[in-house]
Image: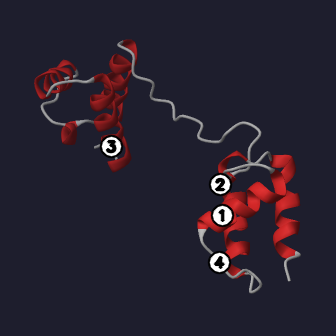
Amino acid sequence: MISHKQRKLLMVAKKALGLSEDAYRASLASVGVASSTELNNATFGQLIKSYESIGFNASPVNTDREGCATHKQIRYIQYLWSANNSVRDKSPEALAHFCKRILGIDSLDWIPRDKVERLIKAIKSLK
């Protein structure tokens, strides 16, 4: 029996490949099962390999933007902004405006990693 995560991957593959329900059921039948609940790890592997042969990429996409602040750094910046008593407007828009004023960058998502510390120090220094 495959895990819930593996079953979700099958649904992602089905959608990404644009498989109809009939085509999906035929792919399951090609590995000898009628339903995804009947799959084991070996048959799951065969099925994913067959999907990869027709264009599905089972590898996760790297969501980190090369050279930009990590999601953890962005959450920390947002926390500092909301926890700072000197900040009157704690909205995300106000933080974006502050970021633009300090770094010249419109969005927290595109802050270069080498400028994260500068923004953190600027937020901490608000009085």
- Judged from the image, the secondary structure of the residue bearing numbered disc 4 is loop
- Residue at the image position 30 percent from the left and 23 percent from the top: 17
Distance from disc 3 to disc 4, alpha carbons, whole Å, reads 41 Å
- Given the image, on which type of amino acid does mark 2 rest? His
Nearest to N terminus: mark 1 or mark 3: 3
Image quadrant in which you'd find residue 13 = top left
Q: Position of residue 73 (x, y in %)?
A: 73, 59
Residue at figure coordinates x 65%, y 54% from the top left: 71
CB-based contact (under 8 Å), mark 1 and mark 2:
yes
Q: Distance between the residues labelled 4 and 2?
A: 22 Å
Q: Is residue 63 left or right of residue 119?
A: left
Q: In this view, does 90 lie above or below 19?
A: below
Image spot of residue 95 (x, y percent): 68, 65
Are the residues at dot 4 and dot 2 in contact (C-beta closer than 8 Å)? no
Of labels 4 and 2, the one closer to you:
4
In this rendering, which labeled residue sits more in front, label 1 or label 3?
A: 1
Local crowd size for mark 2, using a 10 Å CA cut-off: few (<14), some (14–19), many (≥20): some
Asked if disc 2 and disc 3 are in contact, CB closer than 8 Å, the reply is no
In front: label 3 or label 4: 4
**Residue 69 picture location, percent across and down:** 73, 50
- Does 124 sit left or right of 23 as displayed? right
> Where is mark 4, residue-wise?
89
Q: Identify residue for label 1.
A: 75
According to the picture, the residue beneath numbered tag 3 turns out to be: 8
CA–CA distance between discs 1 and 4? Answer: 17 Å
- Up/down of 50 relative to 74, above or below: above
Any mark on residue 122, and which? none
Which residue is labeled 2 in the image? 71
Identify residue type, mark 1.
Answer: Arg
Element under label 2? helix
